[in-house]
Image: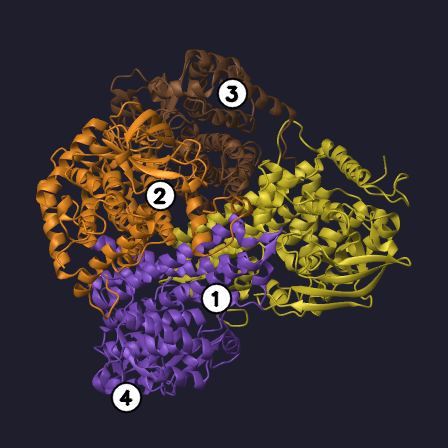
Chain colours: A brown, B orange, C purple, D yellow
């Protein structure tokens, strides 16, 4: 057992921190709030050059064949920097879906472009009546010719407005249980009948879209994996994306804590720094406990994804997603209280952390959902 | 006696009153209400019921409000789409309507434009407004919750005749200049200076977190007139025209994206000496007593507004779905809905207890801090619950057809984060309860301060 | 509107405080922990002389015809004093059931004896599979002759070991909804087939019993109210008993807070009283907020029971029972933390408050149960 | 090198070592483990996995334990029915069995009765014990968690040879005499005096909250040998025979009804001078470093014990009913069960991180306070959840046929209330994190103290 980072991982983190400090300072984040694309070509190129697009891809597609543990290190830094843009949608959702379910020609078509920073994708998953349940998939894909025809609405699709292609989960038949009968498709965003519209969202650092499908035709080359049996692959993709959100949460919470602690050292009230008062000191101590605890679960979940059996991997993901979400929300909220009026102003950056925390909390299963998943696993196992 | 509360009396007319006299007067005014009250109440029992007269009045007002609500009003539109100019205009029109119909300032003397009734009628009016259209009224909360009561209790006759009718009929909107950038929770740490010179106070300094400064006609302003006295004793209370030269207002955008607050820069502002309330050095006392009275009224009104939000949440729970099923079927969210309701009921009945105390001649004390903690934390909790219930919809803001209930919750959620900071942080409130209610010792650093507040 | 106490109520409270300080000091409570009966004849006589047995009875039975608001004032003092013994079971449960559902001869038979301190009763309600749901009644009462025959087990019956009679709720038919088909019976404890056994419980200030019924015959004089329709009366009885528990909780929490605050003023650590540290000061402030808040709901619930419509009355009871229970538990727990090692010792009295708080929390519906009741009412109304 | 951890080395033999030398030694000892460790671990990844060797060892020990658990053992009986004499006897027998089978003191040098392996094997043994029969082992927690590690790291050769084997083979049970009645959270406030006189320390004073003093053979005792130095510098660390004249033990009954703690009165107790650990004045340093090492190990072991409790809770949820339906069907309690599991996983993986740090040569620092907060608050939360799940059954204690799971939860619930008080209150832990990890300023009163700890 060894739960410290390898030297390589420490170096990856150091590089990521340096790159993001240079390329993604908070001014960049604020500019992107108002930008419909939500990122610049310059930073995207830079990220591709860092190798971040292809960390988990096989070497055949220009990838580095690394694990979730390594990726988590980078994502923690991205969460810290509140990196805007379609990295998460492209790399953790679309590319992972291709890696899991795609055939050689599908991979060949999309992965090298992603690796080189030329192609972007997104995952059209969540539906209007699903609430926090990413597995509630009712949109119909009806057989049409030798392919399928898609009709319906997907909501909360991250960064679809800049995606070149979408991976779409739809129901091709009613199954015995909800996970049976789901198929995955890969569809280019120009396809007729598909319309993407940006939603006005609280966390403007990660754009969300509504995607309408009206008789969108998918030919056989667009079917990703075995029809009706897409859930298994999708479930694995979701787990990694959930770990990604956990890592962002840990990084974000860490930064929010640092901001609060620094302020508590310099802000004087009643003749001493507010950090000398136990109400503030213990609040900061709680943040530290929570951040470190969320980090412990993140490491477990990332490690388990790479190394443990699928049962433990799934358990660890749900535990971490429930816990890290609440920690990031709590820490950001608590930081605002430490900062007082300053923290309540738009001018200060802390609210951006709270908003990202709330967005991450409800994305891909909220804490209530994941706790329920945990009990399902614990009582079946 | 046919004299009503706060009507000019021999002993106060034209005279600058002392602090003790003012407190006595407050007690006398309340005593008169109490005498009227005694006739209505059942003496035998603790009674939350309204008297038949009160109930009839409440119904009458609710019906009036239903008929007279401005067409253009809609909570989320008012809040999230209207400019400050529009808000100010709508508020003035609404207040004027109230005034003309005889519902403005129920407990103010008729001589000053009020209705000469008791605080109970005023609370009934405010509760009814709060449960349907609190947004319209909130724009005037400093005017009606702080400025007018202060002027009524502490102002001299000229001040009352000049300002009270204009507060009640919608002519004036007021703002409050208490907080300063370097003061924070240490409110007495006022460094804005006022120097008396040729019948004017020349004011220099900076105020922050000043709601409505951008639309206000007047400002209740706390200034330091004496730098030698201990901190809280050198303060004075001025009524400042916002159109005076040297007043500059800069909006502060808060985390909701709106600018509900402002910075106010004061450079050689010449405020006429007649605009002093009470005497020099009484500023802190005036500010703090008004605050405590306001709080007792505010809790019941807040509860009424929050109850409306809980009802919205209940309605939402029937519409929002998780895994295809309405959230209202999920026991976890049912528990949250119940808890939200319970905490609003706590606030409401806490408010009634404070109000009862006030109506019966008690003077509200530091235990008023409970009310501040209750409303701020209850509102935060309701908003957290609603956002959890919304799930991914919690992300979609006002303006999208996918926004739930007009995207109001997102605004309320973010706005609520300021509740435990504004009007005295929760930490300060708990110091007050600990030290002034429970008599726990001060910590050394604060105990060692000279002013010994 | 007037939410202060009348002078009469203030005087009732003052007398109760004085009586209990004399007759029920903490040494008495501790002695009763080990006593199977749980009270002395002396205190029982004294309480009868105070008029407490008959506060809510009509004057015809020697009562004072007072309201729940008045009774709540006394119960708050009892909670403060941790009064042991069968007052609650006799007055708030058995006598209330007779008042609600009894015919003249049944009332005549029991009430004067209760009023004079000669008779004690209890309510056999709760069943092994009911959990926190006092309305889950499955024990069967089968027709037998012109009466009924009772068989089954009732659990958590307060102070049945010293009761002269029991009011028993049982099912006489399966109804359309669970509240239909419930009948109430009054049975003397000597009756053949009934056996009462004391349970070892955490809160030993209020004894709980298991009562086994084996073909216990009830003649027609023992049927309380209309057969099959006992729920309405029982529901009203339960509401008053629940308010009683709320009042005890407020009184108990108030005392626990006072104990903690006093200790915080005198206990010195690191050269100053611990109450000077914000961690302790704010903890105490929270107790005060909670105690005052629970009091606000108690007053509402007691008032509503006397004066408001049944809908508001039921709503207020469930709100208060959920809230006051949690407050008492939180305050007692928090007081132990303030007291430190001292509060963790058997010798200090604070643990008796925690234990009563836990007992009251789960009696007659726990917070989860009452919150669910609230939503049922809010969504039907 | 064939020399094992802690074996006598030239430089330490027979020599009284200084504080800095001791810390260096600790680092060196750990360095040796680390070197062995490097061969096993995958260098590329953060890895929670056991090596094949570790996994085989864990299986072997679990099988042994299964075969050798004393028949009379049952958690609730051991805890709630056995007298202290019986507990002591059972613990000694169990420890002896462990020793004879070669599972006692896995990481202790063979010269002192240990197995000469690493801390990792020790943790595996302790986790396995914790997940099945932690009660049997808890009676020895001071012996194995405090006394033996302190003697191993700080003791001289004679002390190690004398005491370590008897700790490991079940001969000795130790207790810990740190807390005093007037010290509370201010642990350095030790007033028990030890005066050196004719080759003895003559000890006078009183200790409190001393677990196992009623059954212990020896006591690790913190005494003041110098009243002139600042508070924490005048302390020394003694090994005291509990049978010495002048030692009187009085049990303290705690809120569970049991007496897990004692007061120890010391009147002219003559402790031989050889029983001093380290040097005079090093007492505080010795106490604090041992504590930090213990904590890193303790978290993983605690998590293992708590996980068993969560499993019990899950089982109970299938049996206990609400309105006739098993609680496990109720989403509200399912959430609680999940939360309990999650928090135990936090503790477990936090423990693994600390342990990893320790095994790789790091020295545990003040962030160890997190572990203390985690285990104490997690245990309290699990117990609260279980008691809520039990509903009215939460009232029925051990001894009734109606008691659920032997009435163990009621004991655990009450006992858990002490967790945030014992071994440094939560308030103290948060001061440590705030001041020593986050570098927030001390408050004025504590900052003004002389010793500047």
Residue under the point 33% across and 78% down: C91
**Neighbourhood count class around disc 3 (C-alpha, 10 Å): few under 14, some 14–19, many 20 upward:** many
Q: State the separation of the CA atoms marked 1 and 3.
A: 62 Å
Q: Position of residue A248 (x, y in %)?
A: 48, 29
Disc 3 or disc 2, which is closer to the eye? 2
Circle 4 sits on which residue?
A: C109
Separation of marks 3 and 4 at Cα, in angstroms: 86 Å
Asked whether disc 1 touches disc 3, contact meaning CB atoms under 8 Å apart, the reply is: no
Report the chain holding disc 1: C
Q: Nearer the viewer, mark 4 or mark 2?
A: 2
The mark lying in front, picked from 1 and 2, is 2
Q: Which mark is residue B282?
A: 2
Label 1 vs label 4, nearer the camera? 1
Residue in the foreground of this view, choosing between B314 and B413: B413
Q: Do the residues marked 4 and 2 share a common chain?
A: no
Kindly report the distance in space between the C-alpha atoms of the residues bearing marks 3 and 2: 73 Å
What is the secondary structure assignment of the residue under circle 3? loop
Residue drawn where x is 87% and y is 48% of the image? D157
| Local SS, label 1 | helix
Q: Which residue is mark 1?
A: C353
- Horizontal placement of B171 versus C43: left or right? left
Query: Up-down: is A374 above or below D65?
Result: above
Q: Are marks 1 and 4 on the same chain?
A: yes
> Which chain does the numbered disc 2 sit on?
B
Q: Is residue A36 left or right of residue C337?
A: left
């Amino acid at each position: 057992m060894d739960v410290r980072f390898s030297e390589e991982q420490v170096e990856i983190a150091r590089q990521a921190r340096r790159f993001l400090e240079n390329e993604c300072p908070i001014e960049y984040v604020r500019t992107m709030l108002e930008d419909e694309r939500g990122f610049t070509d310059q930073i995207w190129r830079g990220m591709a050059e860092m190798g971040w697009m292809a960390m988990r891809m096989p070497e055949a597609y220009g990838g580095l064949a690394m694990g979730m543990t390594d990726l988590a290190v980078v994502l923690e830094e991205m969460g810290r920097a509140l990196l805007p843009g379609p990295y998460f949608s492209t790399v953790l959702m679309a590319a992972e879906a291709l890696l899991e379910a795609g055939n050689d020609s599908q991979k060949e078509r999309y992965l090298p472009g992603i690796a080189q920073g030329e192609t972007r994708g997104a995952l059209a998953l969540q539906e209007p009546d699903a609430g926090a349940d990413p597995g509630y998939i009712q949109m119909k894909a009806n057989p049409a010719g030798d392919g399928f025809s898609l009709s319906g609405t997907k909501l909360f699709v991250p960064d679809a407005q800049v995606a070149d292609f979408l991976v779409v989960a739809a129901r091709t038949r009613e199954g015995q249980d909800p996970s049976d009968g789901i198929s995955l498709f890969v569809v280019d965003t120009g396809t007729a009948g598909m319309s993407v519209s940006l939603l006005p969202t609280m966390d403007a650092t990660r754009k969300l879209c509504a995607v309408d499908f009206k008789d969108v035709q998918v030919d056989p080359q667009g079917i990703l994996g075995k029809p009706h049996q897409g859930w298994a692959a999708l479930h694995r993709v979701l787990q990694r994306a959930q770990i990604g959100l956990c890592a962002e949460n840990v990084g974000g919470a860490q930064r929010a804590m640092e901001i609060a602690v620094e302020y508590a050292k310099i802000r004087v009230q009643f003749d001493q720094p507010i950090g000398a008062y136990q109400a503030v000191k213990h609040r900061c101590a709680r943040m530290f406990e929570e951040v470190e605890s969320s980090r412990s679960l993140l490491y477990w979940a990332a490690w388990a994804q790479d190394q443990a059996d699928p049962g433990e991997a799934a358990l660890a993901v749900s535990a971490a997603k429930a816990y890290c979400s609440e920690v990031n929300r709590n820490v950001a909220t608590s930081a605002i209280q430490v900062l007082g009026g300053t923290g309540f102003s738009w001018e200060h950056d802390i609210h951006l952390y709270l908003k990202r925390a709330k967005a991450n909390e409800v994305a891909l299963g909220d804490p209530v959902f994941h706790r329920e998943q945990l009990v399902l696993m614990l009582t079946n196992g | 006696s046919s004299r009503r509360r706060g009507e000019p009396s021999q002993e106060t007319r034209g005279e600058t009153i002392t602090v003790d006299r003012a407190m006595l007067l407050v007690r006398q005014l309340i005593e008169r209400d109490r005498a009227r009250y005694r006739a209505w109440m059942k003496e035998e029992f603790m009674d939350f019921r309204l008297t038949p007269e009160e109930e009839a009045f409440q119904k009458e007002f609710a019906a009036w409000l239903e008929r007279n609500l401005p067409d253009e009003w809609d909570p989320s539109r008012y809040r999230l789409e209207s400019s400050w100019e529009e808000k100010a205009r709508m508020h003035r029109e609404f207040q004027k309507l109230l005034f003309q119909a005889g519902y403005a300032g129920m407990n103010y003397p008729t001589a000053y434009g009020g209705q000469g009734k008791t605080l109970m009628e005023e609370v009934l009016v405010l509760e009814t407004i709060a449960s349907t259209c609190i947004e319209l009224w909130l724009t005037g909360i400093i005017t009606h919750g702080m400025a007018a009561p202060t002027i009524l209790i502490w102002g001299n006759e000229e001040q009352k005749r000049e300002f009270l009718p204009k507060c009640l009929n919608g002519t004036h909107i007021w703002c409050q200049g208490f907080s300063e950038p370097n003061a924070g929770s240490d409110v007495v740490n006022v460094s804005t200076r006022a120097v008396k010179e040729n019948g004017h106070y020349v004011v220099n300094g900076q105020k922050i977190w000043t709601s409505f400064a951008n639309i206000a006609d007047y400002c209740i302003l706390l200034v330091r007139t004496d730098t030698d006295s201990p901190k809280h004793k050198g303060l004075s209370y001025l009524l400042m025209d916002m159109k005076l030269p040297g007043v500059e207002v800069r909006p502060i955008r808060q985390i909701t994206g709106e600018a509900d607050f402002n910075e106010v820069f004061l450079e050689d502002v010449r405020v006429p000496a007649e605009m002093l309330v009470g005497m020099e050095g009484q500023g802190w006392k005036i500010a703090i007593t008004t605050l405590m009275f306001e709080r007792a009224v505010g809790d019941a009104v807040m509860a009424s507004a929050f109850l409306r939000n809980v009802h919205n949440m209940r309605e939402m729970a029937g519409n929002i779905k998780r895994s295809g099923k309405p959230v209202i079927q999920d026991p976890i969210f049912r528990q949250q809905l119940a808890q939200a309701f319970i905490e609003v009921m706590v606030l409401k009945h806490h408010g009634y207890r404070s109000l009862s105390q006030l109506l019966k001649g008690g003077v509200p004390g530091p235990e008023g801090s409970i009310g501040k903690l209750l409303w701020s934390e209850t509102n935060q909790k309701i908003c957290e619950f609603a956002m959890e219930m919304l799930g991914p919809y919690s992300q979609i803001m006002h303006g999208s057809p996918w926004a739930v209930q007009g995207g109001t919750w997102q605004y309320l959620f973010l706005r609520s984060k300021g509740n435990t900071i504004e009007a005295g942080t929760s930490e300060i409130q708990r110091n007050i309860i600990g030290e002034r209610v429970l008599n726990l010792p001060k910590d050394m650093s604060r105990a060692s301060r000279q002013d010994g507040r």
